[in-house]
Structures are given as structure tokens and as C-alpha cells.
Amino acid sequence: MIEFVLVHGGWHDGSCWDDVIGHLEKAGHRAFAPTIAGHGKAADRRVNHAACTASIVDYIVEKDLRDFVLVGHSYGGTIIAKVAEAIPDRISRLVFWSAFVLLDGQCLFDETPQNVAVSEEGARRSGDDTYLPPFEAVRDSFFNTVSYEDALRYYQRWTPQPMQPFRDRLDLKKFHGLTIPKSYLLSLEDIRVPMPDLSWHPRFSNRLGRFRFVTMPGDHEALFTNPGLLAQKLVEAGRR
């Protein structure tokens, strides 16, 4: 049995993992999916990256979770890196699923320069420093393996994303020195970062040093579009 803590990406909340958790539990595993502070419906979105990280650390400590696999999806990769700095002794393995692995001193926007202008303009117009991209902008880059109708249905579960956590520069010196085992899981049809020199693998995966590499067919939103296969691959990535 493997115990997982699943950390979502931008525009999501913990409920996005519900179907994946169902498959993991059916296979005899346990999984928890906290919502990052400032995310989800009716959240107070006035958060920075440190507050987001603290919310996951607090969740883990309050539940006294230990010897678990910590999974981060997309932006969630930046969260689990800082969580690992805070509570390394509780974590058996880190799994980055199509996730950002930042260098020391970087912010997420450094790795998505093509998105900064439109995101900042959206945040300015929002009134609460958040941005929700229109469906047309993400249909082919996030939900590219499913029908238009299914893509729209999944997109409707998104909520506006606080922008400050994307701007905050992270001190990651401690993270890059951690010896916690690491895996990188890549969805092969994931074109969330479409430019070849900014691809998920090997650009981000190689920053982990030694890591287990696992692949699966699927897009960036496989937690919606193929949760059964994603659950299988998380087990493969998270096993000892």
C-alpha cells in the first residue's frame, strides 16, 4: 500500500483529484488531496507562494501524515519543492507530474514568458489579482485528447488563479540539496508548455538530478481525461 498526498496545479482545487483517488483506493492505496490556500471556489485569493506552501504543510502536519509520496502537478511542482524543504523527513518520494521544477531564485513566470503579458493584463482587469484564461485559449493545449464537449465540462471546474504565487521568487537552495527520492511523470501529449526549449522533459526533469522517469499517453489534464491510467502511473512513479 502506498500513501499519496496529491497537490493540484493552477486553476484547480483538491476536488480535481477525486476520480484519481477513487482508482487509487480501489487498488488498495490511500490518497489525500488538500486544496492550496487561495484556490477553489469562494477562496480568499490574497495569497502569496509562502502562504500556499504553508497551507499544504499545515494539512500534512495536522493529519500527522508520514512516509507518503508527495505528488505535484504543474504549478504544484513549485509547491511540493518548498513543502519538501519544510518537512523532508515525512516524505518517502517526490513525484513531479508534468510539473515545474524551478531553479533557485526563479519564479514560475520566468518559465512561462509567453503567458506573462496576458496573465498580468487579466489580473489587472479582474479586480482581485487573479486570472482565468478563456476556454478557447486552453482547449487545445490542456484538453487536447478529448472531445470539445468533455473539454468544456472539465474546464468549467476551473476557478480563477491568484497571480502572486506565480510572481514570487523562490529560494530553493535547500530543495536542490535534498536527497529524497524523486520521480518525473510525463504525459506524452502534454503541450502545456509548447515551445521545444521549454518542454517539460528534459528541461525540468533534469533539474532533479537522479530521478525515476515514467511516461504515459495523455494531456495536461489527465486527472480529468484519463484518471484510471494516471492512478496506475502514479503508483509506478511512487513505488519503492
Image (cartoon, helix red, strand yellow):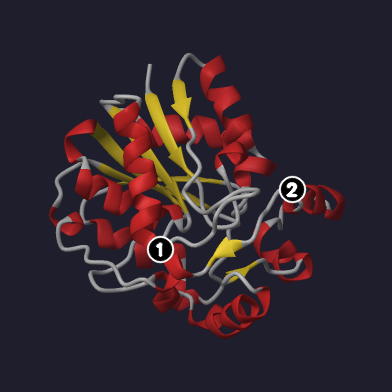
* Residue identifier under label 1: 48
At mark 2, the secondary structure is helix
The amino acid pointed to by label 2 is Tyr
Quarter of image, res 212: top left
Horizontal side of 73 relative to 173 (left or right) equals: right
User: Disc 2 marks which residue?
Assistant: 154
134 displayed left or right of 131? right
Could you tell which of marks 2 and 1 lies nearer the N-terminus? 1
- Quadrant in the picture for residue 168: bottom left
Q: Is the C terminus in the top left, top right, bottom left or bottom right quadrant?
A: top left
Tell me if residue 80 comes above or below residue 240 in the rendering. Answer: below
Q: Pick the residue in front: 104 or 179.
A: 104
**Quarter occupied by the N terminus:** top left
User: At numbered mark 1, what does the secondary structure look like: helix, strand or loop?
Assistant: loop
- The residue that appears at 61% across and 81% down in the rendered structure is 124
What's the residue at 36%, 68% (across, down)? 203
Q: Of tags 2 and 1, which is closer to the observer?
A: 1
